[in-house]
């Protein structure tokens, strides 16, 4: 039977009932409990005792009330509705509706607002947050008689929200600072935006050639003139760097699993569809990481919305990326599958106007390092008989023993953790990278133990989807650390850096990949500050939510982990870090890189060689010399494809 998320509401509850009601012959059978027919599948599941208690949700809201931030509390309430599927929703509303509307109650002293109007305003605010997450308050049967949110009102809010994106004054000056290649691309793209014929572009340039600089120039120019320019990226970190950026998955509702569904889950009548209809420009960064199926689903979406068979529906679309970097992430995929799944293998590739950026701004700071990176990225750096390249001894930390050398790497990247704990913004752009999650977990555990302050330990609740076998597997589930899920045992301290693992509410800056600083740690809620993008400085509440393993997990047992959807981010995987430039980079090669572009991505996150240290764990140890050799994987076939 197909797995269904609890966020799917009645569909999830009907599936739950089908697993537990014996021999049903109709939907009436699974709606009937003790000879009484219930009004909803949720009600029937509740009556049968199949749903968890709302205790932790109640506790989460109770802790959040103490912060006296009603607008943030309403956003949290909406987040809990979507991600936690409360059982006794009416009781929760009855208990917290006063706290959810205290700001409107204060307004009542200055204007004539009835209690019913106060409730309606709070519900409308919650509904706006729900709609940003693809839901409506009517999905939860939680409305007052006076509640209304007509489509034209929602559409106006969506469009005005995009039009109202703040343009930083310094961004308005960026077009004056473009080099000749950037200015040529800028002029061509803007000309297309104001022509009657749409056009699709691909900006190709290695790290340091100013792709992000160009993107910001385009976005600032159009938005400052009142036009809508939509910015997305394939990865969460890259999206957080773009002003008003979202992940492509969250913005266009692109399927995560193309084996089940190949179409974007957006209706032609939705507010986002109307937004796409009105926009002047759609910009997609790190498109080199995207599967071609993603791009093709996006193309189909725009053709449908625009009623046009032109590529991308005749809209002006700008893709950007660097095929020296990592390709789409497909677990256990062969080289052939990775190349086959890449953007240049799509029929759409030949429809793009390719623009190259070659003037490397970083080369001015360290020309030798810049040339070395290009040779690494293009597979031109000489290799020895073992197929390995040599790194400069200047960037390699000598290996004496694992603990001593690892501590040396940590001290190079984070030389003053005491200072960083008091002023975390000083450290947020420093990071240690590694090829695999196991190494990243090892580094984050080491660093949180060194980080000053009292540790708060959060233990997850793990349950298998088929709960009648729960007792057989609980300890096993607790020991699992699947990709994309938080750990069973999560260690945090105030002012430590964390990364969000789910799209809680992209419009509010809460995307998969958003980086935050922990400000206050309660038992059931984390108060955290967003550190990048237009939402930087915003304080948000992060609750525990149920998270389900993907269908292709190796242990073969689908299970649900209820935990804060975050991980520490002193260290990141190389793939996660793609798209950002860091102040200082550590590279921990306990394991060798295993896919195209990983070594190039890791090394090129630094601006100069002086901002980089690498620790190689050698297969054999010779204390008379430093081992500076490592693997570099490059699929030259991808470069041939991009030329076609």
Image (cartoon, rainbow, N blue to C red):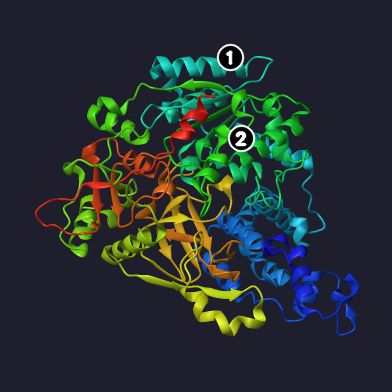
Across and down, in percent, residue 148 comes to: 79, 49
Q: Residues within 10 Å of mark 1 (few under 14, many from 20)?
A: some
- The residue closer to the viewer here, 299 or 171, is 299
Across and down, in percent, residue 369 comes to: 25, 32
Report if residue 367 is visible in the image.
Answer: yes
Q: Is residue 472 left or right of residue 214?
A: right
Residue 283 sits above or below residue 42 on the image: above
Residue 155 sits above or below residue 118 on the image: above
The C terminus, quarter of image = top right
Q: Which residue is mark 2?
A: 162
Q: Which residue is mark 1?
A: 191
Q: Circle 2 — which element?
A: helix
Label 1 vs 2, first from the N-terminus = 2
- How far apart in space, not on screen, are marks 1 and 2 (Cα)? 22 Å
Numbered disc in front, either 1 or 2: 1
- The residue closer to the viewer here, 530 or 394, is 394
Residue 266 sits above or below residue 528 on the image: above
Across and down, in percent, residue 102 comes to: 61, 59
Q: Residues within 10 Å of mark 2 (few under 14, many from 20)?
A: many
Q: Is residue 368 left or right of residue 488?
A: left
Residue at 20% x, 44% y: name it.
395
Quadrant hosting residue 176: top left
The N terminus, quarter of image = bottom right
- The residue closer to the viewer here, 472 or 513, is 472
Residue at 30% x, 57% y: name it.
590
Across and down, in percent, residue 364 comes to: 26, 24
Q: Are marks 1 and 2 in contact (CB under 8 Å)?
A: no
Quadrant hosting residue 116: bottom right
Residue 501 sits above or below residue 236 on the image: below
């Amino acid at each position: 039977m197909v797995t269904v998320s609890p966020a799917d509401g009645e569909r999830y509850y009907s599936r739950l009932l089908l697993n537990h009601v014996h021999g049903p012959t109709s939907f009436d059978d699974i709606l009937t409990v003790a000879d009484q027919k219930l009004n909803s599948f949720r009600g029937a599941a509740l009556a049968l005792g199949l749903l968890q208690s709302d205790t932790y949700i109640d506790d989460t809201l109770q802790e959040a009330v103490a912060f006296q931030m009603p607008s943030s509390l309403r956003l949290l309430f909406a987040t809990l509705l979507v991600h936690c599927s409360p059982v006794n929703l009416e009781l929760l509303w009855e208990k917290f509706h006063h706290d959810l509307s205290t700001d409107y109650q204060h307004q009542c002293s200055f204007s004539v607002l009835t209690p019913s109007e106060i409730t309606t305003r709070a519900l409308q605010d919650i509904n706006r947050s729900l709609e940003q997450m693809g839901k409506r308050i009517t999905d939860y049967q939680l409305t007052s008689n006076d509640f209304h949110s007509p489509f034209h009102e929602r559409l106006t809010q969506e469009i005005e929200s995009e039009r109202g994106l703040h343009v930083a004054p310094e961004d308005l000056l960026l077009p004056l600072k473009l080099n000749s290649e950037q200015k040529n691309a800028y002029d061509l793209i803007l000309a297309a935006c104001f022509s009657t014929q749409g056009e699709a572009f691909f900006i190709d340039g290695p790290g340091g050639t100013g792709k992000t600089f160009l993107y910001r120039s385009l976005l600032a120019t159009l938005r400052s003139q009142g036009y809508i320019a939509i910015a997305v990226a394939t990865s969460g970190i890259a999206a957080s760097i773009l002003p008003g950026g979202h992940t492509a998955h969250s913005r266009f509702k692109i399927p995560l699993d193309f084996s089940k569904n190949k179409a974007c889950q957006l209706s032609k009548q939705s507010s986002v569809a109307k937004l796409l209809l009105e926009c002047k420009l759609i910009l997609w960064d790190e498109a080199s990481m995207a599967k071609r199926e993603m791009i093709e689903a996006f193309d189909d979406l725009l053709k449908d919305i625009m009623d046009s068979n032109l590529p991308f529906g005749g809209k002006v679309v700008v893709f950007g990326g660097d095929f020296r970097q990592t390709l789409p992430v497909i677990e256990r995929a062969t080289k052939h599958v990775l190349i086959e799944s890449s953007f240049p293998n799509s029929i759409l590739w030949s429809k793009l106007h390719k623009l190259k950026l070659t003037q490397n701004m970083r080369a001015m700071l360290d020309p030798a390092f810049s040339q070395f990176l290009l040779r690494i990225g293009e597979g031109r750096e000489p290799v020895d008989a073992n197929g390995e390249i040599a790194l400069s001894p200047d960037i390699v930390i000598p290996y004496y023993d694992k603990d001593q050398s690892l501590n040396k790497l940590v001290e190079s990247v984070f030389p003053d953790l005491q200072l960083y704990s008091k002023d975390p913004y000083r450290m947020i752009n420093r990071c240690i990278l590694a090829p695999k999650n196991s190494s990243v977990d090892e580094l984050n555990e080491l660093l949180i133990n060194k980080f000053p302050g009292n540790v708060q330990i959060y233990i997850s609740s793990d349950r298998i989807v088929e709960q009648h076998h729960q007792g057989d597997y609980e300890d096993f589930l607790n020991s699992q650390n699947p990709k994309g899920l938080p750990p069973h045992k999560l260690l945090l301290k105030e002012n430590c850096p964390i990364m969000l693992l789910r799209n809680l509410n992209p419009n509010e800056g809460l995307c998969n990949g958003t980086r935050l600083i922990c400000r206050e740690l309660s038992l059931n809620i984390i108060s955290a500050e967003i550190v990048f993008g237009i939402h930087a400085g915003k304080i948000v509440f992060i609750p525990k939510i149920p998270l389900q393993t993907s269908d292709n997990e190796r242990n073969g047992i689908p299970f649900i982990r209820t935990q804060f959807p975050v991980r520490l981010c002193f260290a990141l995987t190389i793939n996660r870090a793609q798209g950002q430039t860091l102040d200082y980079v550590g590279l921990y090669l306990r394991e060798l890189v295993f896919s195209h572009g990983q070594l190039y991505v890791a090394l090129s996150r630094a601006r100069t060689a002086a901002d980089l240290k690498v620790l190689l764990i050698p297969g054999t140890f010779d204390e008379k010399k430093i081992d500076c050799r490592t693997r570099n994987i490059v699929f030259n076939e991808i470069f041939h494809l991009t030329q076609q």
